[in-house]
Amino acid sequence: MIGKTISHYEILEKLGEGGMGVVYKARDTRLDRPVGIKFLPPHLSQKEDAKKRFVQEAKAASALDHPNICTIYEIDEIPEGQMFIVMAHYEGETLEERVKKGGIGVEEACDIVEAVAGGLAEAHRRGIVHRDIKSSNILITGGGRAKIIDFGLAKLAEQSHLTREGTTLGTVKYMSPEQARGDEVDHRTDIWSTGVLLYEVITGRKPFRGDYDQAVIYSILNDEPPGIKTLRPEAPAAVEKVIKKALAKDPEQRYQRIEDLAADVRSVREAARTKTASGRPDREKRSIAVLPFVDMSPQKDQEYFCDGLAEELINALAHIKPLRVVARTSAFSLKGGKYDVREIGEKLNVDTVLEGSIRKAGERLRITAQLVSAADGYHIWSEKYDRKLEDIFAIQDEISLAIVDKLKIELLGDEATRLVKRGTENLEAYDLYIRGRFFWEKRGEGLKRAVEYFEKAIEKDPNYAEAYAGIAESYNLLSFYGYLLSREAIPIARENALKALEINDTIAEAHNALGWIHQYHDWDGSAAEQEFKRALELNPTYTPAHYWYASMLSLTDRDDEMLRENERAIEVDPLSVVAHAQYGWDLIGRLKLDQAEEKLKRALELNPDYALAHWLLGWVYDLMSKDDQAITELRKSVELSGRNPWILSTLGNVYGKVGRTAEALEVLTELQERSENEYVQSLYFAYAYAGLGELEETLTWLEKAYEAHELWLIVIGRFWHMDPVFEKIRDDPRFQAFVRKILASIR
């Protein structure tokens, strides 16, 4: 075969051979690129119906665009009828070869298996089951990336009645119980095989063994594998739990989604990464809350400056892995309260508190900072800084490094560099930026003022990446709250997020903004997830990235991961009203109404005037058919939000559904009148008409919303089957056709 040309592929060398064919390296003479060619065994090509089904499945697999799936270029056959597959060629080795070499650490093992699970998740979302996941079907490229190969071949073998004797022993060792019995299989067979894979890369051996196929099958059906700790004592207990769940013999007791397995593997990996490269024990985990500094200036007009210094310290300290830093929202929620440091420690679940004051007069600063033990009020460290205003950046560095020193934290890798990095050396730009952040935190109309300050900061320093990120996040929220048309706001947000990352690709806020755009405007969950993950890698305390990522997981039906991400948001920001409300929102989408009610009531304990929480609670009561309570909560939300048209339209919807037609029409009239002078989304009119059961009007306004690519259409697409807004028209074929159109646009 070597030296021959098949079609336009010149065969160069043989790479390997197995039960499912022979693989050669070849050169694509048309595109002058290396490729891999797998020639399938002749007996797999004998049945025409099996060949047709294989081609269909292989074509479906070739459409999979994922970094952990080997790219398929072509499926063809030689004149004699033997089929071959042309795929991308990667330098590297199979995972089987890598395991035989030994020395795979827990962290690397988890990286590999999480990558494989990511590729399988994409396949499962497309309805494709691999059926033959094993270490020899995973390529590890020269760059260390895992690639899954041979989609569809196991099914072809099954359809061609390949005998058990013709199947390789290696494949049998990865079979799920249902596969071994010859039962019908689904995506959970891949989950089992991935569990086998995880066991193998951790221990260096397969979990089920035997001298011949039937002995292996007996073990799969009846035995439990040896415990991980007996083979690798230093392996974390958590990985054994993951494997045990993946290898549950009853498919119903296994992970039901490969994404959930991936999330647990990720958690094991993150825990493993807290160990140093030399294998020393985990660094001691300390915790701190940075409280807003008290304004002691004569005019009491430096609140923004005090808040800005505290926020900069929070962001700096968040880069230190063994230090858990409470997020800004929770720390700042205690501003002005007369709390003992022990109470603060209890409320925020921290062992240390940084507090201080600032007196700013002209170009002079006096900053007092003190680090206090939350257990007993003991002052661990304190310092006064009498400096010029231009020294503010140096003071931030000194405080951060003093905290690290006094808490006896060892900085590793680039942590020291990231601790003192800053976005600008221009003092005027910095002052304008922290003013912008001050108004950004206030939301609502404050977002427009925030943009003004961010833009002024950029005028002073055109390379101020954080200011561009601030503009991006502001425009995202202006579209979210309905202040601006998304088609006007999102291009500006995208441009500024990309500009921020062009200057500095380690800005968490910019990655978060881009993730939000991908999710709610581009309807591209995969791209969104990459950005949210990067944001959280850069700043684990950035709460918005946690709860927007959780919402993305909710919209893609990844419930276990959604719950975990929301819990993380509350862990880093326990007093955040927004984090609790967003958690409630995600629970509503899963119809966990009692739990949603609990989270929303907790949000309202934190801030009784938070309009969004009242709105969501009204939604919960609407789903519970508690009409009076729903209307009460929605009315509160309308007033607290300044009669926001989004919330107002929901109230109108409920009025219509409960027969209070006159009040529903009053809402419609108000929306129409306001639309003459301000932006009112088409979707809001659809909500109001849907409550009245006006199908034609509802569909007309929904089409207008679709043409305008309004943000919340993605929510309708995902949750139309339970959204109470559309309960009167949900069963109409035209409404369902509209929903299908939305779903077809979501990636």
Image (cartoon, rainbow, N blue to C red):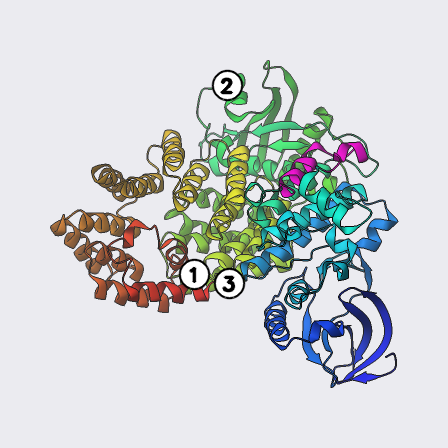
SS assignment at label 2: helix
Residue denoted by label 3: 747
Q: Tell me the amino acid under the disc marked 1.
A: Ala
Label 1 close to label 2 by CB (< 8 Å) = no
Residue at the (11%, 51%) spot, across then down: 662
The magenta stretch spans residue 242? yes
SS assignment at label 1: helix
Between marks 3 and 1 in the image, the one whose residue lies nearer the viewer: 3
**Residue 645 at x, y percent in the picture:** 27, 52
* Crowding near the residue tagged with mark 1, few <14, some 14–19, many ≥20 C-alpha atoms within 10 Å: some
Between marks 3 and 2 in the image, the one whose residue lies nearer the viewer: 3
**Residue 293 at x, y percent in the picture:** 53, 30
Q: For residue 121, what is the image quadrant? A: bottom right
Q: Which residues are magenta?
A: 225-248
Q: Is residue 107 left or right of residue 504?
A: right
Above or below for 487 versus 452: below
Among the two numbered marks 3 and 2 on one chain, the one whose residue lies closer to the N terminus = 2
Residue denoted by label 2: 343
